[in-house]
Image (spheres, rainbow, N blue to C red):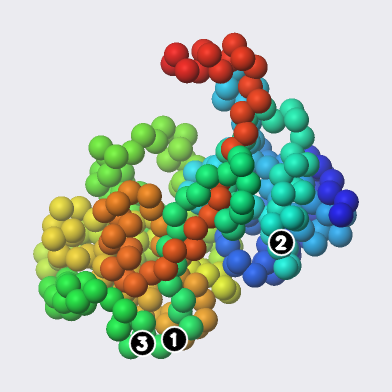
Amino acid sequence: MEILYLKNSDIDKIRWDATINADPQGLPYAYSWYLDSTTSGQWDALITPDYQYVMPLPWNRKIFGIKQIFAPLLTQQLGIAGPNLSEKITIDFLNKIPPKFKKIVFPLHQKIDHPRCRTKTNLVISLADDYKKIQEGYKRNLVRGIRTADKKTSINESLLIDDLLTFYQQTLRSQLNFSEKDWQIIRQLLQSASEQIDTLMLEVRNETGERLALGIFLITQKRIVYLMGCANEEGRKNFSSSFILDTVIKEYAGTNRIFDFEGSDILGVYKFFKSFDSKEANISIYEKNALPWLVRKVMELR
C-alpha cells in the first residue's frame, strides 16, 4: 500500500471530507473543519493516493520549537479513516509518520496490540433497539432520578454558545486548566460544528429558571458524541445530567447510531456512564518520544 505524506496546503479537503463522511466509525473529529478549528489549521496528513485511507497529523511546536503530534482539544479519537480497517493498515500508517515529529501522542479509534500503545477507556450504547429496551439496562436509581428530574425541572435547547461556555467554565473552574486561547478554540469549534453537522445543545433549568446543567452533542449519520457536559451542585443532586443524556438517547433510540459517552478513566465518571448499561469500546493511544536527550531531561525537571 502506497502511503503519502501531504502538507496541509496539498490536501484535497473535498475528497478528505468524503472519506471521513463514509468512514464506518461515524466520528466527527477528523473532518477538515473540525481539525481546522482545533489546531488553528496546523495539521498535515498521511493518505493513500486515492484517498481511500486518510490519517490526520495535528501538530504544534510547543516543545522548544520541535514539532510534535498531539491530540487537540475535544478530540478523543482520530486514527485512520477508511473501509475494512485492519490492525496491519493502522501500523503501516503509524510507521509512515515522518521522523521530523519527535514526540507523538496520537489517539486511534480502535484498540491494537502494539508496544507503543496504551489503552484508553471509551463507553458506548447501541441505539439499534427501541427506547424501552435500552432503558431496561439502566440502573434502578438512575431511572428513579430521571423521573424525578422530569417532574421538577425542564429541559430546553439553547443556541447561546457563549452563555453555555460561561456556565461550563464557572461550573468546572477548579477542574479545568484551559487558557484563553483554548476557550477561543472551543468557541470556534462549536460555531463550526453548528454550521456543518447536527449539533444539539441542551440545558436543564429549575422552576425558578436557574440553569442546572448542560450537554452538547455532535450527531453524524452513524454516531452521537457527548462532546461536553456539566452540572452544578443542584444539578448533580437533581440528576440533571442524567436527564439530558436520557433525553438524547430516547430521541435517537431505534436509529441504529452509536451513542458515544467518550468514556472516562476517572472511576466516578466511569460508574456514572456504566449506570446507563454502556459497554466498553476501548481505544489505543499511540505514543512515541524521540526528543533529544537534553530536551527530555529539561522537561522532566519542569
The residue that mark 1 highlights is 129
The residues tagged by marks 3 and 2 sit, at their Cα atoms, a distance apart of 32 Å
- Give the crowd class for mark 2: few <14, some 14-19, many >=20 residues within 10 Å: few
* Residue 287 image label: none
In the rendered image, residue 234, in percent from the top left (x then y), is placed at 13, 57
The residue that mark 3 highlights is 133
Q: Which residue occupies 43% across, 40% down?
A: 183
Disc 3 marks a residue whose amino acid type is: Lys
Question: Is there any visible trace of residue 142 in the rendered image?
Answer: yes
Q: Which residue occupies 38% across, 53% down?
A: 264
> Which dot, 3 or 2, sits closer to the camera?
2
Which quarter shows the C terminus? top left
Task: Indicate whether 146 appears above or below 113.
Answer: below
Task: Give the mark nearer the N terminus: 3 vs 2.
Answer: 2
Front residue of this view, candidates 171 and 259: 259
Q: Are marks 1 and 2 in contact (CB under 8 Å)?
A: no
Disc 1 marks a residue whose amino acid type is: Asp
The residue that mark 2 highlights is 86
Front residue of this view, candidates 10 and 62: 62
- Give the crowd class for mark 3: few <14, some 14-19, many >=20 residues within 10 Å: few
Disc 2 marks a residue whose amino acid type is: Ser
The residues tagged by marks 1 and 3 sit, at their Cα atoms, a distance apart of 6 Å
Quarter residue 274 falls in: bottom left
> Which dot, 1 or 2, sits closer to the camera?
2
